[in-house]
């Protein structure tokens, strides 16, 4: 009887799924911000660390000024990105780049084929700009 109980306890870890830890699936780096004609050109580096292609990858960004006040909000399409591939995308935002203190990835509104929640959880963020935080 005791032997069966110990055997059952030994098998228990195999029957209960291990907690899923967040894995960096996509790297998103704010690489540059350049002023051009009263607009700000934001350049991002997107790294798909998975084997699967991402057909659509739309992020909801909120831009804050240096005083942490919301300046603008924009939804931008970062995809498509092939599997195990890095892409560079540039987007234009109204206003002066110097008035950006932080960028919040508020949400992932589309992520195909994975679901948006998985893409947001698996998103690793970095910023090369001094004084501009990129976070979720």
Image (cartoon, rainbow, N blue to C red):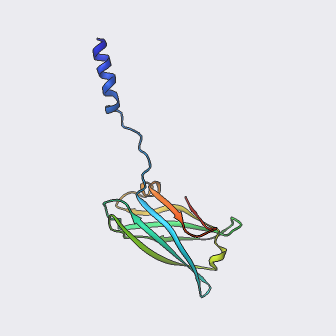
Total residue callouts: 0
Specify the farthest residue to the bottom: 37
What residue do we see at 43% from left, 64% from top?
A: 110
Specify the farthest residue to the top: 1
Provide residue 75's location: percent of width, then percent of height.
Answer: 51, 70
35 relative to 135, above or below:
below
What residue do we see at 31% from left, 12% from top?
A: 2
Between 77 and 86, the one nearer to me in the picture? 86
Provide residue 77's location: percent of width, then percent of height.
Answer: 44, 71
Q: Quadrant of residue 98?
A: bottom right
Relative to residue 65, is residue 127 drawn left or right? left
Q: Quadrant of residue 45?
A: bottom left
Between 48 and 104, the one nearer to me in the picture? 48
Quarter in which the N terminus is drawn: top left
6 relative to 72, above or below:
above
Q: Quadrant of residue 133?
A: bottom right
What residue do we see at 31% from left, 60% from top?
A: 51
Quarter in which the C terminus is drawn: bottom right
Provide residue 69's location: percent of width, then percent of height.
Answer: 69, 66
Specify the farthest residue to the right: 67
Relative to residue 5, is residue 119 drawn left or right? right
Provide residue 37's location: percent of width, then percent of height.
Answer: 60, 88
């Amino acid at each position: 009887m005791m032997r069966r109980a110990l055997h059952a306890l030994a098998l228990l870890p195999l029957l209960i799924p291990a907690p899923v830890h967040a894995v960096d699936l996509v790297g998103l780096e704010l690489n540059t911000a350049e002023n051009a004609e009263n607009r700000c050109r934001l350049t991002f580096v997107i790294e798909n660390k998975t084997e699967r292609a991402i057909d659509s990858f739309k992020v909801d960004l909120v831009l804050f000024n240096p005083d942490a006040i919301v300046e603008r909000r924009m939804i931008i399409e970062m995809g498509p990105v092939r599997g195990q591939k890095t892409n560079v995308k540039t987007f234009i935002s109204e206003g002066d780049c110097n008035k950006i203190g932080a960028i919040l990835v508020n949400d992932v509104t589309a992520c195909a084929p994975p679901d948006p929640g998985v893409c947001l959880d698996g998103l690793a963020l970095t910023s090369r700009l001094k004084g501009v935080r990129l976070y979720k």
